[in-house]
Image (spheres, rainbow, N blue to C red):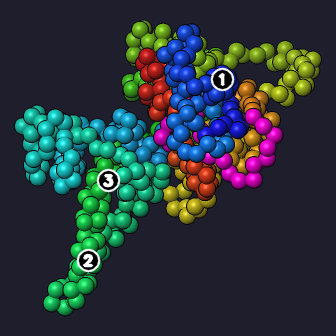
């Protein structure tokens, strides 16, 4: 592929675009010594080498680069797509779900083990050999970790991965009913023709495989549901995240987080909430900021003072200085009106781009907008909105978006106006969540040209916070 159009948002996106354009025409694998081995250089070479590898006949393509820094709100939220919630609750390593049997409910562990036996998967270092409930001895010997592949080769997972978890469980029930109907319709040799029996047997292996996969995903869904939708604290967490996305009072937000700190909930979760509060409110009032800092140190130890300082340095938990009312009035009169209007806050963007949506588990709307918002149960990531604008030919026309992202650009290598869709490569610099990928897929699903989603890493809120702050 030859990059005909390069678009991007964010400072790192601009840097990467320059590297990609520089490397695109080079035939040598040599790189400049000052960038040798850096993640940005390796990523840029990967993108530029699409043409070199001759994977497809040379043709024009589009590249969209999104810098993670333009949307730090989304990683702080809980993902609600089927794949995203598995990531949040169990963790996915590359394409494998590594399940600790010891942490599963005994009934769930039995269902998963039986399915893996039928499918021929291995568990830990040894094969699973027992069809009965795992005993303590079993768990201690060779069944501690199960590695379950979650890829498009699993037809059940492929149908569920981008759906909101509630919709996914309903879809799973529907698939299970279809599989059961097939078995209930098993023909009798005495009452049917041999051709009908042969036709049934021909489809038997497919449905047998589906039945095993349905059992596996039913077990996983049951385990996740137990930890989330059936847990009162998880429901409160969801309500709290929506409180931050709304224009609720600062006092109510402070009290909600303070209560969680007092219960010594996992620090990563507390830090995610603090960042979400600050990012969506243009900072936290000075009094709340100082109180929270004191409470975190008291609950988790003085060693985490540096963690809070890192959070502040990164702009993820900052305080707003209290302004004198008279000084503020004078300032507003003499300030430059044009500069004042140029500043775009997250709240402005939330309203103008309709990032927060109404969501109901009973909704039947299948539009791209609805599907994209369901990945976060009523929230469309800013990154997904950027993709939507890129594929709808409205790139960089929204002034608020340009002001918020600081750097939004479009580079065309020629003046040719293409009448058909071009292959699109979407590159996330700084990582992307599985929920964001589901939202992006909703906006590009109907494109006829190929779409490739690439990223420096797959992230979730906890791992992202750990990377940023070492928490």
* Residue at left offset 61%, top offset 52%: 449
How far from the left and from the top, in percent, is residue 305? 47, 10
The total number of labels drawn is 3
| Nearer mark to the viewer, of 1 and 3 | 1
Q: Earlier in the sequence, mark 1 or mark 3?
A: 1
- Of 58 and 189, nearer the camera is 58
Q: Which mark is residue 200?
A: 2
> CA–CA distance between discs 2 and 1?
58 Å
Identify the residue at horizontal 19%, vertical 40% (top origin): 123
Question: Is the N terminus in the top left, top right, bottom left or bottom right quadrant?
Answer: top right
Left/right of residue 87 with respect to residue 344 in the rendered view: left
Tell me the tag on residue 217: 3
Foreground: disc 2 or disc 1: 1
Q: Residue 304 lies in what quarter of the image?
A: top left
Q: Residue at x 29, y 74 (%)?
A: 182
Q: Which residues are magenta?
A: 413-435
Magenta stretch: includes residue 416: yes
Asked which secondary structure carries label 3, the reply is helix
Circles 1, 3 touching at the beta carbon (< 8 Å): no
Mark sitting earlier along the chain (2/3): 2
Q: Residue furthest front?
A: 27
Q: Is residue 58 visible?
A: yes
How many C-alpha atoms fall within 10 Å of the one at disc 3: few (<14), some, or many (≥20)?
A: some
Q: Secondary structure at mark 2?
A: helix
Say which residue label 1 marks.
22
**Residue 235, percent across and down?**
44, 44
Camera-nearest residue between 79 and 294: 79
Q: Going by the picture, which residue comes out furthest to the right?
A: 334
Comes first in the chain, label 2 or label 1: 1
Q: Is residue 180 left or right of residue 314?
A: left
Q: Quarter of the image holding residue 251? A: top right
Q: Position of residue 100 (x, y in %)?
A: 24, 37
């Amino acid at each position: 592929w030859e990059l005909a159009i390069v678009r991007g948002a964010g400072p790192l996106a601009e840097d990467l675009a320059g590297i990609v354009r520089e490397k695109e025409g080079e035939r040598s694998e040599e790189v400049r010594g000052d960038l040798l081995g850096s993640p940005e250089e390796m990523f840029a070479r990967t993108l530029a080498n699409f043409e070199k590898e001759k994977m497809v006949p040379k043709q024009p393509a589009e590249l969209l680069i999104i810098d993670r820094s333009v949307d730090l709100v989304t990683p702080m939220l809980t993902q609600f797509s089927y794949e995203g919630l598995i990531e949040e609750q169990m963790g996915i390593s590359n394409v494998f779900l590594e399940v600790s049997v010891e942490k599963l409910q005994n009934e769930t562990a039995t269902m998963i083990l039986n399915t893996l036996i039928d499918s021929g998967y291995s568990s830990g270092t040894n094969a699973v050999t027992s069809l009965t409930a795992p005993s303590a001895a079993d768990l201690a010997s060779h069944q501690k970790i199960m590695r379950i592949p979650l890829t498009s080769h699993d037809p059940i997972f492929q149908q569920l991965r981008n759906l909101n978890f509630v919709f996914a469980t309903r879809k799973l029930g529907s698939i299970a009913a279809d599989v059961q109907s097939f078995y209930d319709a098993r023909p009798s040799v005495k009452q049917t023709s041999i051709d009908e029996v042969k036709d049934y047997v021909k489809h038997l292996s497919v449905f047998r495989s589906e039945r095993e996969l349905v059992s596996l995903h039913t077990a996983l869904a049951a385990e996740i549901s137990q930890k989330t939708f059936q847990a009162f604290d998880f429901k409160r967490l969801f309500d709290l995240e929506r409180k931050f996305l709304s224009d609720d009072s600062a006092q109510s937000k402070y009290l909600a987080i303070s209560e969680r700190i007092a219960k010594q909930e996992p620090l990563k979760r507390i830090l995610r909430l603090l960042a979400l509060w600050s990012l969506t409110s243009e900072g936290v009032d000075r009094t709340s900021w100082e109180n929270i800092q004191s409470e975190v140190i008291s609950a988790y130890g003085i060693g985490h003072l540096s963690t809070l300082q890192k959070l502040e340095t990164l702009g993820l938990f900052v305080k707003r200085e209290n302004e004198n009312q008279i000084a503020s009035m004078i300032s507003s009169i003499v300030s430059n009106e044009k500069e004042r209007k140029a500043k775009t806050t997250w709240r402005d963007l939330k309203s103008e781009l309709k990032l927060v949506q109404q969501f109901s588990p009973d909704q039947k709307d299948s539009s791209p907008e609805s599907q994209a918002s369901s990945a976060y149960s009523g929230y469309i990531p800013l990154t997904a909105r950027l993709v939507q604008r890129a594929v709808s030919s409205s790139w960089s026309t929204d002034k608020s978006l340009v002001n918020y992202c600081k750097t939004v650009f479009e580079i065309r290598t020629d003046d040719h106006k293409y009448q058909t869709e071009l292959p699109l490569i979407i590159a996330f610099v700084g990582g992307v969540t599985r929920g964001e990928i589901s939202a992006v897929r909703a906006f590009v699903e109907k494109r006829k040209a190929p779409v490739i989603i690439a990223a420096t890493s797959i992230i979730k809120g906890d791992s992202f916070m750990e990377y940023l702050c070492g928490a």
